[in-house]
Image (tube, rainbow, N blue to C red):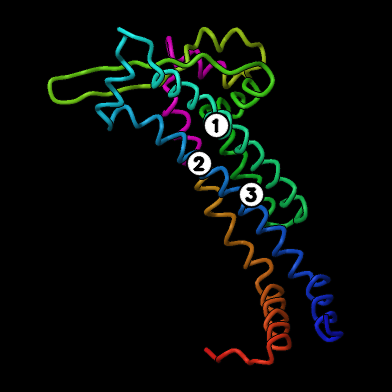
Amino acid sequence: MRPELKEILKAIRAHSGQRAYVKWEGLRRTHLVVAGNFRELRALLDRPSHDVEYFLELIQNVRPSLVQDEFYDEVDRRLHNFVAAAATLIDHTRRLVDDYAGTSFAEEYTRRKDELIAQPEATFVRDLRNFVLHYGLPTIGGTFSIGKEAFGSQIEIPTASLLTWKGWKPNSRRFLESRGEGVVLTEPLDAYAKSLDSLYQWLFPHRDVLHGAEIAEVNRLRDRFNETLTGRTPPSE
């Protein structure tokens, strides 16, 4: 690499705007993992209510059903992926926000985060992550119904099987006890995912509020690197 390119690259790597960009980009990627895991899980939970052939295969009981086994195995996998990734997202965000300790941004994030985790559905999902990772996969079953003009399904976890674990926080335990015989998975998952989405819609624009000028400087250095590398000046906007 030519010396002038090395100097520009060195300046990019040392620039505070580059460090900020990498840090916030890493969090954005973690958030995309969580959002993708939620979409996959939610689509699977919804499928029996939208696909009549799939629905009928799940409720048949006259022969062994590979489709039924695969469905519940896949619910296990996607539920594990979502709750684990959601906890990872909170940990990654905490590390990022710690860099802004004492600022109004950090204080407002903490207020919003505390408001989120005070919700019983959020506490339950966070505790479910610990249940799944440290205790075992929950028992999962389905309630299927057929009407004259429609059919439906609800995928549930029996509360009795969950309450045998002693690790539930009081808020989670009260939530479980209020669910009767089973927790319909979509209810706490939807509430938690909606709250997470609201939190990160507020958070991500702060990257440019906090570091917009620095990142713009880094982008100009990148333009300079490309111009030097190719000998071409990019067209003006």
Screen quadrant of the N terminus: bottom right
**What is the chief secondary structure element of the magenta stretch?**
helix
Tell me which residue sits at (50%, 22%) in the image.
Answer: 73
> Closer to the observer: label 3 or label 2?
2
Q: Which residues are magenta?
A: 173-195
Q: Residues within 10 Å of mark 2 (few under 14, many from 20)?
A: many
Q: Are marks 2 and 1 in contact (CB under 8 Å)?
A: yes
- Describe the element under mark 3 as helix, strand or loop: helix
> Closer to the observer: label 3 or label 1?
1
Residue under numbered circle 1: 122
Tell me which residue sits at (62%, 33%) in the image.
Answer: 84
Along the viewing direction, whichever of 231 and 85 lies nearer the viewer: 231
105 relative to 77, above or below? below
Name the amino acid type tagged 1: Ala
Say whether residue 76 is left or right of residue 27: left
Tell me which residue sits at (50%, 41%) in the image.
Answer: 195
Residue under numbered circle 2: 195
Along the viewing direction, whichever of 212 and 47 lies nearer the viewer: 47
Q: Residues within 10 Å of mark 1 (few under 14, many from 20)?
A: many
x, y (%) of residue 176?
51, 16
Q: Quadrant of residue 28?
A: bottom right
